[in-house]
Amino acid sequence: MTHVTRRSMICFASSALLTLSVQAASPEVVRLGFAAPLTGPQAHYGADMKAGIVLALEDINKQSPVIGGKVVRFELLAEDDQADPKAATGIAQRFVDARVSGVIGHFNSGTSIPASKVYADAGIPQIAMATAPTYTAQGFKTTFRAMTSDTQQGSVMGAFVVKKLGLNKVAIIDDRTAYGQGLADEFEKAVKAAGGMVVAREYTTDKATDFASILTSIKAKQPSAVFYGGADSQSAPLTLQMRRLGLNAQLVSGEMTRTDNFLKLTGEAANGVIASLAGLPKDKMPGSQVLIDRIKARFGVADFYAPYSYDATMVMVNAMKAANSTEPGRYLPLLAKTQYTGVSSPRIAYDSRGDLKYGDITVYKAEKGRWTVLETVSGG
């Protein structure tokens, strides 16, 4: 072997070692966007959702993933959209300008829907917690859900109230947000389809705390059940005021009421309230409880959105791995073909619109400071 050849081999080996050393020391940063209410009355929802994403990215980064031949490290750009649609679109544009590879968010339907157009125009995949049917009905190829839609939840709850509980006279209140109104609309359709009668349809806002006039009007119509579409910051005072007014109708609501926060705000008045939640009960998805325990130990609080945001993050990153690229346009087709076993569901897959193919819904009842399972309905 000549001196020149030996020196060339040494230089090549040194260069290779240097390259490996640089890759190990300086992984390529891949940014994901996250937006949700992190301040205000809905801050607990956003904090829970964020905790799941943070833990997922930490778990992923521990594995030093290699995508496109490079070691990558995922970073989260987190923004507080305050559950405000206008703020959400501004944040969406900032994420686009920051060249994020994907977005886990927003939380509310009312923020996810306007932001989705910004992401769609930029070709950036978005997995939102939004449940309003409009979110995926827009036809964007970039929109995906982390939870089942209001169509699934509302139809299950409407049939449950009429057929299982035998409550045929129903009053409906919603907060006029995309989420609250969408859920209430689907619930109303299901009640009527099951042979029930809607005796009142009332409206409020997502900032309201005084429901005296609405409840007085409803009480005169003697409903056997009252459905509320909205967050626990409204359903809690609504519950307390129903009790004080002597309105003994069964209160029914959706997943934004089925929270520990609702139980804390209402105390004993919560007893008997019924609410739905996407997914299987924790005892049937042990991974979900393990994750919640980890989050409680790490962040101090956890409710039930964290498992969904954890899975959404894993699903997005797995699509990047499958495509061997973090470029949105390259991994988007693989995201649409997702087949994933998560902590929130044993079968996560999307239909052509980005809705979850399998939408299990569990109905819960508040009893003595905890939520107990009444029934689980399989959505596929």
Image: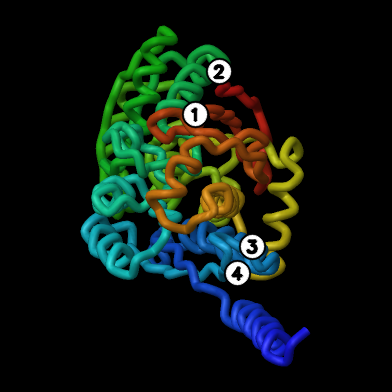
Instruction: Work out how far the residue at label 3 is from the one at label 2, CA to CA, in angstroms.
Output: 45 Å
Q: Which mark is residue 250?
A: 1
Label 4 is placed on what type of residue?
Val
Q: Nearer the viewer, mark 2 or mark 4?
A: 4
Few, some or many residues within 10 Å of mark 4 (<14, 14–19, 20+)? some
Among numbered discs 3 and 1, the one appearing first in the sequence: 3
Assign a secondary structure to mark 1: strand
Assign a secondary structure to mark 2: loop
Q: Residue at x 45, y 67 (%)?
A: 31
Label 1 is placed on what type of residue?
Gln
Q: Within the image, what quadrant is residue 230 found in?
A: top left
Image-based side of 255 in relation to 292, left or right: left
Residue position for label 3: 60
Q: Residue at x 69, y 68 (%)?
A: 62
Image-based side of 10 in relation to 85, left or right: right
Label 3 is placed on what type of residue?
Ile
Among numbered discs 1 and 4, the one appearing first in the sequence: 4
Instruction: Work out how far the residue at label 1 is from the one at label 4, CA to CA, in angstroms.
Output: 55 Å
Q: Nearer the viewer, mark 3 or mark 2?
A: 3
Q: Which mark is residue 71?
A: 4
Assign a secondary structure to mark 4: strand
